[in-house]
Image (spheres, rainbow, N blue to C red):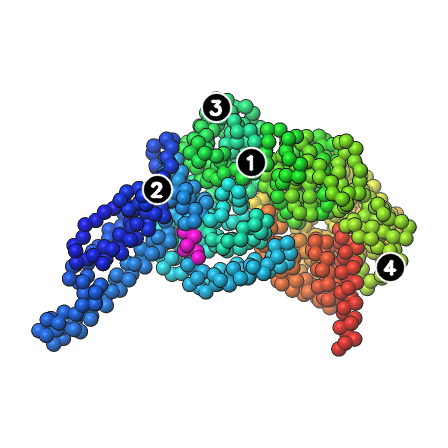
Amino acid sequence: MHASSSTTVPSGARAVTRVMRSSLQDAAIESGASGPCATAGAAVPRIAIASRRACIGATTAPRVHRIPDRAATNRVMHGQDDHNRGSRHRDGRAYVDRMREPEVERREDGERRREQDEAVRDIARLRVGDVRVAGGKGANLGELRAAGVDVPHGFVVTAQAYLDAMSRAGVRRALIERMKTVDADDSAALAAGSDEARAMIAKAGVPDALRAAIVRAYRSLGDPTTRVAVRSSATMEDSAGTSFAGMNETFTGVAGDAAVVDAVQRCWQSLWGRRVVAYRAAQGLTEEPAIAVVVQRLVESERAGVMFTADPSTGERGHVVIEASWGLGEAVVSGMVEPDTYVVDKSSGAILSARVGTKALEIVANVRREVEPERARRRALDDAELKALATLGARIEQHYGKPQDIEWAIAGGRIWIVQSRPITALEHAHPTAANRTSGAPLLRGLGASPGRRSGRVRVLASAEQGHLLEKGEILVATMTSPDWMLALRRAGAIVTDAGGMTCHAAIVSRELRIPCVVGTRDATRFLRDGEVVTVDGNAGRVLAGEIVGPSAIATPGAHEPVVEAGPTPMSPFARAGATPDRMVSARGELFAVAAIEPLATSVYVNVHSPEGIEEIAAGPVDGVGLLRAESMLAEALEGAHPRTLIEEGRAREVVARMSESVLRIARAFGSRPVVYRTYDFRTNEFRALRGGKDWEPHEENPMIGYRGAFRYVKDASIFGLELDVLAQVREQQPNVHVMIPFVRTTWELEAVLERIAKHALGRERGLKKWVMAEVPSVVFRIPEYAKLGIDGVSIGSNDLTQLVLGVDRDSAVCAELFDERDEAVLDTIRRIVEAARASRLTSSLCGQAPTTYPEYASHLVRFGIDSISVSPDALFAARAAIGRAERKMLLDATRR
């Protein structure tokens, strides 16, 4: 219904007219529309950008409201009976009753229809003041459209529609009460509360009337297969103080009635995601949260990205910073690619700098694909397009009166704006990095490795730039992979744009015992080479300047890194405060050597390189449960693909370097077992090496692609080098054994074991052969594996969790879903342990869970696991947890 319409109706329909007029006035007040129904004095901002208000697809035609005839309306609205008709016709009253019922139903249906139409608003009806109705994103999009900016046509499912749906389902109060009891600093409580809240919303569903209204609005955008973007728009989102950037859900390429409604409900659920709840708590937001959902016709962009109308890292307001890449903007916003970065002078339009990113991937029609090398190295935007974007950005900033963070897309030569919000971090930015207030929070992400360290920033675009990193500097990158190892060893701390708690940077930093924050999204853009920052791996923050607390354990020189209590490159056993009769763990815990109790469950460590291995081996550890090959192999390869070196005749060099590293580790542990896991590079990691693209296929999802045992079957050349290494090492150190990763089927394992048997390594007496239990199929195949001669299974909780829950463990977006403590994961582990025991195989676990959650060990002990392997920094905590679990089991047994 148009807010500005005015209709004259017969006097007998005054009741209906009053209802309609009231609805019109409500709509005018909420939308800020002008006209006779608008609120007096309402101001609607305007700017002169482009006068056109074109949209993608057809616009919604105005509805025609039919007014009942005067007499019928009087009878229905006022309950009047026609006594004269009843006196003239015996069946008159029955006739009127039969007629009245459909009239009442039609009126009630109309009211319900109007109510639901108010729950679903056309973006064109929204203005910046409608944040309570449409959330920050929806209100801003309506404002921009009214100002003449090209915004894709669409609609908003209002925040009130969400609240009404929860009220009707009887869960609105329950949601609030449940979250009141959650301690956002307690990860377990946060996870449980979030999961319960999301389950309540899933059970509540979408009311039928609202579902019908959403479908009607969706159909107005085109045919039933129209592709749309469905994006969350929380009422506290995209404000000057809180952005909730990337925390609430977004779905692109959604098509079909059911899919759109489902995406809306999933956006509702994201309002109670773990990161969102934690962020609200950190920001001190206590009011009941509500969420609207924006549905817009998808812009199938050739190029897209982000534009800042002030430099967010320096605070320079005379600059426009533009990031661009190929395909949909999701690749830039999610940190999937290193985009082009351009700086444009706001007043003159001069291009001040143009840094071309790698742009290795693009998203087209919801498919992530590799960009050809020549196009990847090309600029995504020419000078004319940069100036056009900068001009548009400046006008949008002028309209709002403050610097904006704008998402844009280009399709068919036309610039579309898909989001605009204030730059929330600008108050922390200053003209020079040196002037930043010491201790000011710059970035927040996931604390992947604890401890605090300060140093100078070094932003690296690729592993090839690793030589630029000086020892002790803070390494900042989009993401790391095994070919970064040489640089990682020199880093004082690590900060990445992407990644989760089990990504490469997270795992390696824990083993190197240096602080790490992953999934910041903006580190490579916000931080600048040479500025001094402090990385707080405990809280998942990056702070400005050198921050030294009272527990500092090092006194640095003028430009040396500052380290606080927590993981450091030092040995976890040779730390300040240690004496011959006491040890200090990497987490600062003090232990008397004599008091370290013997355990029934063996405790191993996970290592990836020989660095510091002698100190690790000197601790209370039973051996190496997981010796990862990838880092040592990457170092031995010197940045080249192994097949390239084999073709160059340099295979012996690789074997010699690898043998030296493995031998040093084996010697440090004497007769204690060292279980070497053969390489498990994924194709995307191999492709990043020199010559990699000549040998590696492109895969859309390498995490579950060409890797592990299947790779050895298809191409045994690299696996053969590892067998040569192990054979050489075992000639001097027979405590080294072999473990095969990512085994999916029995025939794969049989083929791999056959290769080992034919090699010199297979003739070694006492060689133990293990398999990683990472793929859920292992639960059913352990008896078959035992018959093939396997000696043990080691559970890789990272990959197992990923495959049981269907969550990419490297995804920062899905990080809150990845939880090794999930009941389904724990039950799978229990089944593996029991199956191994029944088949007389040794069982172990070498994933991240016991390191991140020491209490996890109690579950494993209860299941009857034989050994647990953890990161060196978690050794003491794991031993303590295992000891408590074993003692509790003994007490429980005696009490029965």
- Mark 2 or 3, nearer chain start: 2
The residue mark sitting in front, 2 or 3, is 2
Q: CA distance from mark 1 to mark 2?
A: 30 Å
Image location of residue 116, percent across then percent down = 35, 56
Label 4: how many residues lie within 10 Å, few (<14), some (14-19) or many (20+)? Answer: few
Which residue range is magenta in the image? 157-163
The residue that label 2 is drawn on is 42
Q: CA distance from mark 2 to mark 3?
A: 32 Å
Nearest the viewer among 433 and 648 is 433
Q: CA distance from mark 2 to mark 4?
A: 75 Å
- Contact between marks 2 and 4 (CB within 8 A): the answer is no
Q: Main secondary structure of the magenta part?
A: helix
Which residue shows up at 16% across the image and 54% down it? 10
Circle 2 sits in a helix, a strand or a loop, which is it? Answer: loop
Residue 426 marker: 1
- Mark 3 or 1, nearer chain start: 3
Which residue shows up at 23% across the image and 58% down it? 15
Amino acid under disc 4: Ala
The residue that label 3 is drawn on is 347
Circle 1 sits in a helix, a strand or a loop, which is it? Answer: helix
- Contact between marks 1 and 2 (CB within 8 A): the answer is no
Amino acid under disc 3: Ser
The residue that label 4 is drawn on is 595
The residue mark sitting in front, 2 or 4, is 2
The residue mark sitting in front, 1 or 4, is 1
- Mark 2 or 4, nearer chain start: 2
Image location of residue 644, percent across then percent down = 70, 35
Q: CA distance from mark 1 to mark 4?
A: 53 Å
